[in-house]
Amino acid sequence: MRTPSSSSEGAAEQGGAGDKLLELFMGDQALAAGNLFVEARIRAAFYPKFENDKSDQQTRTRMIEMVSRGLATMEVTLKHSGSLFMYAGAHGGAYSKNSYGNLYTAVGVFILGRMFREAWGEEALKMQAEFNDYIEKNRLNISMELVTAVLGDHGQRPKDDYVVVTAVTELGHGKPKFYSTPEVIAFCRKWRLPTNHVWLFSTRKSATSFFAAYDALCEEGTATPVCKALEEIADISVPGSKDHVIVQGEMLEGLVARIVSRESSVQMEEVLRNFSQPPLDGVDCDLGPNLREICASNSLDEKQKIKAILENLRSSLYPDHSDWFGNSGLDAQSRKADESVVAYFLQAHPTDYATKKLQEMIRLMKQMKEMKPSSFPASFKCYWNYQKVDSLSNDNLYYKMVIHVHSDSVFTRYQQEMKKNQGLWPLYRGKMDHTTEISEDSNILLSSIEGSLDSSSSVKDGLADEDSNLMVKLKFLPYKIRTFLLRNGLSNILKNNQSAYSDYYVRQMKSWGTSESKLKELCKLLNEWAAYIRGKYGNKPLSSSIYLNVENFKRKYLGEAEPFLEQYAKRSPANLALIRAAGSMVQTENFLAILDAERDEEDGFQPEHVVAPSSPTASLDVVSKIEGLIVFFPGIPGCAKSALCNEILKMPGGLGDSRPIHSLEGDLTKGKYWQKVATERINKPFRITLADKNAPNEDVWQQIEDMCGTTNAAAVPIIPDSEGTDTNPFSLEALAVFMFRVLKRVNHPGNLGENSLNAGNVLIMFYKLYDGKSRREFESELYERFGSLIKMPLLKPDRVPLPGDVKSILDKGLSLFRPQRRKRGREEPSNDSYAKEWEKWEKRLRKILFRNDDYLKSIQVPFEVAVKEVVEQLKAVVKGDIKAPDTAKRRFGNIFFAAVTLSQADILGLVRKVAEKDTAVKKFLNGVKLEDNLNKVHITLAHKSAHGVAAVASYAVYKNQEVPVSFNAFFYTDKMAALEAQLGMVNGETIVSRNDWPHVTVWTAAGVGPKKANTLPQLISEEKAKRVAIDPPITITGIIDFY
């Protein structure tokens, strides 16, 4: 191998020779003769990007359900704030996300080498060599979180520079296989590599308690209280070899929860028995200059910084530096290969199954990019593999291919394609391929390609694919404030004005579901931050000093943020509790006491879900009569929405209440329809609006949500009932019926009827707007957003299957739609080569549908029956008979306590019964205004300031469950009154309050907080209060909830 000290002239010569080889062995003649063969190997890959199709709440519900049924275990790990770093050995390579041979990989190799010296001491060089041999022999890739202060600021500048192993991938000769977490722990303890903190939850109670604990800490969580709470809740806890508080600090980015095999708990216990936490033999040794010292003296030039870092490796971990400097000199351009390599790679014969699957993946990605480059920002870069430069020959050329994904949207779109093609390999993050081009003379055996079995299966460790990928990221607000509001908001502060920054941070916090109280606190902090930055830099060009531009400023923003936050925190304990950590000031264990001092009483809190108990004296209004209501239609033309609206308008008595009903028909409304609806809602907010227009996408749904918020309205979607497909909420049968109805229309106001020449194309377009969502996902998202859903019957359950000619013409239209979009980027045919094909298709469509007239009529539910069912459901929503489902959208606000919620009417009735039997109580009640004190009647079960987060979270398993409460005594003084309570059972388990005296505070005098009622038993013993027995006890049903 040539060394970095070789001349740059040699690099240029090598590049020229490589180009000649490329021309010789990759020319069109070689391809035409079929002489090119290719072998590709993945050398680095991290888990596929997980962006759940479901909402976080749906994912939580499914994860808890799987754990409850014994199908899986839930695993939770800390999210360290750093960068992805992957290592595949001295010859396999070192990689960062989307690249290699850069500052990130140099830093990663340096830190990993330092971790070996710290762990093995004098044995480090020997163990590094053995480690490299082992992972290269077994074709392993080690993925790590690289945490350092020299690559840019995140939530907090780490106290130390380190790595934590997050995945071990067996690359082999097929699809990458990821080690289970117990296997990762065993591997890391064998080689003394740093591990993350892991918690396992294998019961319904522990899993539900985990999510409740996060909700209790989501707006204040830092490392110490979060880890403490999880220690108390988890069934198994495996501490990390790197303590987050010691190496990174209190500022915790978040947690990652995912579903793993149900055997994980047993496997983890076995690993912990067989592999103890290894010692650190080199912790007291001289490790040489650290990373910060090296970079501080080489701070201006990145190449010099890389060179200095690699020169200080002091290890055998990565002796070949050609990835950074090429085969000769520092000319990085010499390593880049001709762009045509990718094209030749895709056209050459694959030598094995893995190469075939990689070609399939890259070919699809290139096709998607060609269809719409702006919506699929990805690129493919090929470089000469300088580690194999001495092996170049007439028969072999070696490259490294980098799949560069520029936006997370690429992963989302690729996942949608995987739903359609189950055989596709996943698109891994940080993916790097080593590609070898070989000639026909290499005697490669091709018979193994078709016979190879893909290791992918529909079942992984007993879990279906959909469930095996269940993951959810749970980030904490203190981190998000710093990273997303302070750092990422700098562009708005410096380039725009205060108003733009305010709009930015309010929008961000609302998207996170931040509680109103916290939002108000943060507005003051963020406005001061903006004023501070603008005052210091607002009138200066950022080209001075280290702030070369806004982006560079953002990378090192903590240099300004930490002093600012520290000064802000010093002003009051409440400010410190808000910020959680700044400079040398850290608020950990006692922050709850600060909050409790400010929110000592429970009056100001709201239950997470205002659900009234089933009581004769209580009623539930989901849609309050003082609110408006928006009825809208996520459907397709032909779904009968206009006909339904007309029937509703004609009904005597409307929907059963006094609110007027108004319909706004889309085909007769000029201008921007949804803006018109918003204006109508503002002018007359209390009426029921029938939004008679198809609402096919999330942008429209968001507008409707915004209208609900601004006009105090609820919204209910009405959708055609249909089974749907794996990738669309509507079946082909439903689409056929919609088309048939549209083509039967006469004099349609929107000109979409029998005389419309492109009616079929328009319906195909609408159908495609829903692509990417299964029926369950479609319904669940609407449920989550709006809390209720009405289904309009469409197809008879006992119908015969769709005729073959109808299915064929629909399939043809769907396939025809895709290439047309690729050619023109438009949604309807234009006057080009596709126009004639569409015209032909439209004529055949009409002929086939009309030929199946009797069938298409016979499979439909009669319209009058459908109207009757929809109206009944709609009246139930208006009356409040339909409760919001469990997946109803809620704000993940900060939970402070668990309680049993009771009906005010029930408690008033109970107290009055006591008064009927006791004249002293009756006289007492005549002198107080009891109703004014009974706004939020509850029995506190646990408060996080008094009992801890884990105690509050332990009631999550009973959330929304009814529990009987027996009241056996009434206590009172001239300052307060309360009812003594005894809690009953839920599902055979007695509910136990952490309070020494379970009770309901029914009244306190002015200036006396409800918390004082806890002293009533003591006052009884001191004869300073009165107790009246309730005999026999009176039982009332309550609901367990969080506040």
Image (spheres, rainbow, N blue to C red):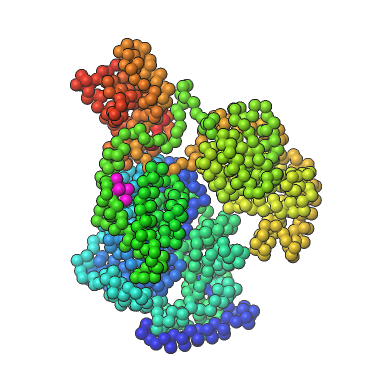
What residue lies at 22% left-to-right and 23% top-to-bottom? Answer: 1019
Instruction: Indicate whether 631 appears above or below 530.
Output: above
Instruction: Indicate whether 289 appears above or below 274.
Output: below
What residue lies at 42% left-to-right and 37% top-to-bottom? Answer: 608
Task: Say which of 125 and 769 sits in front.
Answer: 769
Instruction: Indicate whether 772 appears above or below 24.
Output: above
Instruction: Indicate whether 680 appears above or below 351.
Output: above
Assess whether residue 318 is covered by the magenta stretch: no
Q: Residue furthest front?
A: 539
Q: Position of residue 585 (x, y in %)?
A: 25, 53
Horizontal arrangement in the rendering, residue 762 relative to residue 359 (left or right): right
Looking at the rendering, in which quadrant would you find the N terminus? bottom left
Q: Position of residue 664 (x, y in %)?
A: 66, 40
What residue lies at 31% left-to-right and 75% top-to-bottom? Answer: 298
Horizontal arrangement in the rendering, residue 83 relative to residue 972 (left or right): right
Q: Which residues are magenta?
A: 574-579
What residue lies at 43% left-to-right and 88% top-to-bottom? Answer: 9
Task: Say which of 412 and 554 sits in front.
Answer: 554
Q: Is residue 513 visible?
A: yes
